[in-house]
């Protein structure tokens, strides 16, 4: 038995590769606002949190990346009001307000995107505040998350096993932080490569992601070539003469 290239298999592999390449190009060049951070772990928020007129609600313990250029909250109201707001981001450790933005009333209810000035540095303990400057109550979609402070744990005096602490649920306004403007995945590739290496061995750098992608490409290409070869029975001259 010998192996030879199968033309139909080679053609199918070539077409599949071109389709895959076209889809990959379409995905990596699609420009849109890119999420930088969020305090939500759910796709849809199921809690409506009130901010009465003239009052402010702040959510602390927020991670605010340096490249944050837009804050998205989800606004609503029972009366349909669209009151003016003031949104601010502060560093809770230093007390510095790094950005503040006024939002005029009359905006569409639902996802409300508020452009902000990027803080220029990562804020690990950020505080995002929404102040209602109008005369009617506003509601913002929220969610329940564990509190940072845990209640004291109880343990069995006759056992060395500690009972896990009970953490009551808090309610937070959902806050999604986006990078400034619209970016494609290709434009973000250097930053993705940098973050990809953060939790890898000490010797790993931004090159690691590209190296793994190159290896994957070689493996896929080799697999396609192997699949395109088919065994072909060989003719034995001696048997043909004896027959």
Image (spheres, rainbow, N blue to C red):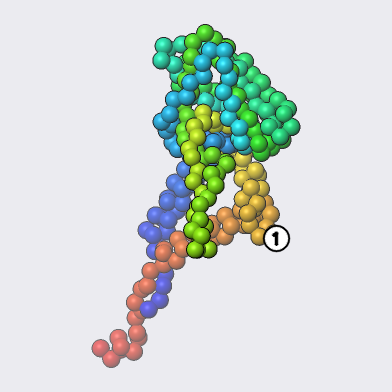
- Locate the C terminus and report the quarter of the image it occupies: bottom left
Q: Is there any visible trace of residue 27 in the rendered image?
A: no
- Locate the N terminus and report the quarter of the image it occupies: bottom left
Q: Nearer the viewer, residue 17 or 142?
A: 142
Task: Tell me which residue sits at (61%, 35%) in the image.
Answer: 62
Q: Tell me if 149 is positioned left or right of 207 in this view.
A: left
> Dot 1 lies on which element?
loop
Q: Nearer the viewer, residue 2 or 169?
A: 169
Task: Tell me which residue sits at (61%, 17%) in the image.
Answer: 86
Residue 147 image position (x, y, % from top left): 54, 39
Q: Quadrant of residue 233?
A: bottom left
Q: Is there any visible trace of residue 149 in the rendered image?
A: yes
Task: Tell me which residue sits at (68%, 32%) in the image.
Answer: 92
Residue most extreme to the front:
157
Q: Tell me if 47 is positioned left or right of 92 in this view.
A: left
Q: Nearer the viewer, residue 4 or 109?
A: 109
Residue most extreme to the top:
135
Residue 55 image position (x, y, % from top left): 57, 16
Q: Nearer the viewer, residue 219 or 63?
A: 63
Residue 21 image position (x, y, % from top left): 49, 47
Q: Is residue 150 above or below residue 118?
A: below
Q: Residues within 10 Å of mark 1 (few under 14, many from 20)?
A: few
User: Which residue is tagged 1?
Assistant: 203
Q: Is residue 226 above or below residue 217?
A: below
Residue most extreme to the left:
243
Task: Tell me which residue sits at (65%, 51%) in the image.
Answer: 198
Q: Is residue 215 above or below residue 84?
A: below
Residue most extreme to the bottom:
242
Residue 94 image position (x, y, % from top left): 74, 32
């Amino acid at each position: 038995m010998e192996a030879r290239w199968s033309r139909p298999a080679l053609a199918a592999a070539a077409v599949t590769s071109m389709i895959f390449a076209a889809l990959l190009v379409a995905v990596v060049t699609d420009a849109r606002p890119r999420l930088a951070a969020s305090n939500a772990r759910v796709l849809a928020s199921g809690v409506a949190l009130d901010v009465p007129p003239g009052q402010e609600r702040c959510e602390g313990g927020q991670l605010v990346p340096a490249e944050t250029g837009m804050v998205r909250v989800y606004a609503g109201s029972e009366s349909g009001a669209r009151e003016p707001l003031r949104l601010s981001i502060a560093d809770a450790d230093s007390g510095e307000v790094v950005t503040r933005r006024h939002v005029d009333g009359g905006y569409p209810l639902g996802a409300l995107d508020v452009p902000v000035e990027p803080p220029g540095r990562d804020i690990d303990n950020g505080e995002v505040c929404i102040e209602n400057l109008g005369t009617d109550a506003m509601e913002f979609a929220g969610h329940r998350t564990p509190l940072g402070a845990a209640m004291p744990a109880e343990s069995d005096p006759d056992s060395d096993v500690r009972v896990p602490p009970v953490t009551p649920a808090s309610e937070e306004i959902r806050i999604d932080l986006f990078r400034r403007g619209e970016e494609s995945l290709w434009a973000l590739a250097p930053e993705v490569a940098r973050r990809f290496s953060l939790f890898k061995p000490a010797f790993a750098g931004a090159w690691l992601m590209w190296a793994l992608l190159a290896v994957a490409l070689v493996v896929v290409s080799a697999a396609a070539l192997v699949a395109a070869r088919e065994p072909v029975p060989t003719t034995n001259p001696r048997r043909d003469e004896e027959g």
